Amino acid sequence: MMTDIEIAQSVKPKNIYEIAQTAGIDEKYIEPYGRAKAKISLSFLSECGSRQGKLVLVTAITPTPAGEGKTTTTIGLGDGLRRIGKKAVLALREPSLGPVFGIKGGATGGGYAQVIPMEDINLHFTGDFHAIGAANNLLAAMVDNHIYQGNALGIDPKKITLRRCVDMNDRQLRSVIDGIGGMTGGVPREDGYDITVASEVMAVFCLATSISDLKKRLSDIIVGYTYDDRPVTAGDLKAAGAMTALLKDALAPNLVQTLEGTPAIIHGGPFANIAHGCNSVIATKTALATSDYAVTEAGFGADLGAEKFFDIKCRAAGFTPSAVVVVATVRALKMHGGMAKTDLAKENLTALKNGMPNLLRHVSNIKNVYGLPCVVAVNRFPTDTESELELVTGECKKLGVNTVLSEVWAKGGEGGEELAREVVRLCEEENRFEFAYGLDCTIKEKLEQIVKKVYGGDGIVLTPNAEKQIKKLEALGFDKLPVCVAKTQYSFSDDPQKLGAPEHFSVTVKNVKVSAGAGFIVALTGDVMTMPGLPKVPAAENIDVDENGRITGLF
């Protein structure tokens, strides 16, 4: 059996101009990066962006080590829609090098449902992440230089909130002391690094709608506070113009293709457990302007990616989704039911039934909290038995939701045709889309509503530090912003060990800060790290390249 990268390398990509033509994008808007990938000029949206397709979100159950296949299903659905005669375009996130070289591996789909060129997308791609990291670190350099050069703004070195970033899992950089090179080495202080996908610059980049909007958002980034507790922004440091210059080219969305030639726009990639987990607004708008069905995804389970997609991205951009796909696997549900990963190949209806509440809570949230039509896509594995599949179907029917078997990993678009037909049907259903909370609620009320409505918990516990920070943000007038909860992806709760659909729990909020440029408040819960570490055996150990430049081991 071929690996994902071998399958990807076996298909010759179509010329990117042909893919652009498929999407209805004139070649004058295409800026090629070689033959198989390109940037779409920002002028395309302003000149040709009046068309509005249906927006379809693909999300998933709470992830497990067994795998769910959300990105694979998203890609296969796009191919399936085209196979049944619909004009579909994908809008996906760019992979981070952290997971590529860490545990998770690449993020371009799998089997016969992939986007290509797989190696390029998973590695440097068109340089967007490098530009985002450079813009972030330019701002960090200007903060410390300002202090070194006399500190006219009165920035308190102990109150700097901006951290440097690098797109790599490197636990060594979580906490550092810098500026220790003597008189000319800067002002010594405690500092630290986030992974690039957790940077506020990434969030700003993904929510910006134009170069001017990008510059305004960058200018609003709060880098720290003065000795008398006034916020200092990138605008105060006169950094926004230079940061925008670094990001100008990156802001144009990237065009690639699936193995079957479906246009795919891949742009931006914040993590959903520590950031808002969605591709760029510009990418989604471009997909909507070039298709009848724009298929997109949000990171991790629906309690994270989908919640943030609805409550942050859709609110900011004015999107109204038409349908939602919740991806699940029998294997993962059995893990939620207490089964060990090593035993998942065996039929176990008891474990499956015990794990079903996880799926059903996600489905109920989509239908009842957000008011959207929903279908469950069961990503089929060869070990799944008919009895197991029937159990999943029967339990979902009790909620009035259909279940469709997805076989896109093995069959590509052909294995996604049934799912595509169900999605088309759902897109014509009544849409009662609403948010989980209103912006007029207090910060505490917003957090309470997310925990109670979406997570199924009893409420929140604020540490004294979080209480103090909320009062400060309220005094500064940031209390009407939406909230972005940084939480473990492995549980509805803030405890990664609580699988399934836990009840009677509270979520402890340890830290609350504002991302004023992005336009949301970040609430840190549990032990979520904004700089992950590598595992004992990182994926990087298995990646190699031969004398001809052919890469192997990239998932």
Image (cartoon, rainbow, N blue to C red):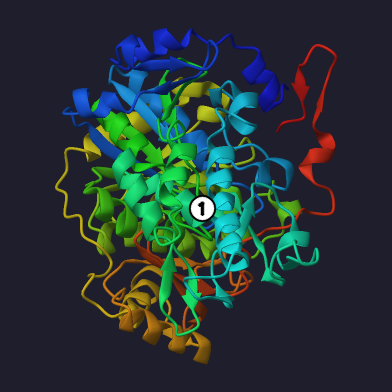
- Tell me residue 105's x, y (percent): 68, 40
- Tell me residue 23's x, y (percent): 32, 17
* Quarter of the image with the C terminus in it: top right
- Left or right relative to 343: residue 163: left
Tell me what residue is drawn at x 44 percent, y 88 percent: 467
Q: Which residue type carries mark 1?
A: Phe
- Tell me residue 6's x, y (percent): 70, 20
Quarter occupied by residue 323: top left
Examine the rendered structure and indicate whether residue 360 appears above or below residue 477. above
The residue labelled by disc 1 is 300
Mark 1 closeness class: few <14, some 14–19, many ≥20 residues within 10 Å:
many
Which secondary structure, mark 1? loop
Quarter occupied by residue 456: bottom left
- Which sits in the foreground, 160 or 512? 160
Tell me what residue is drawn at x 63 percent, y 58 percent: 335
**Residue projecting furthest to the bottom:** 464
Whether residue 88 is visible: yes
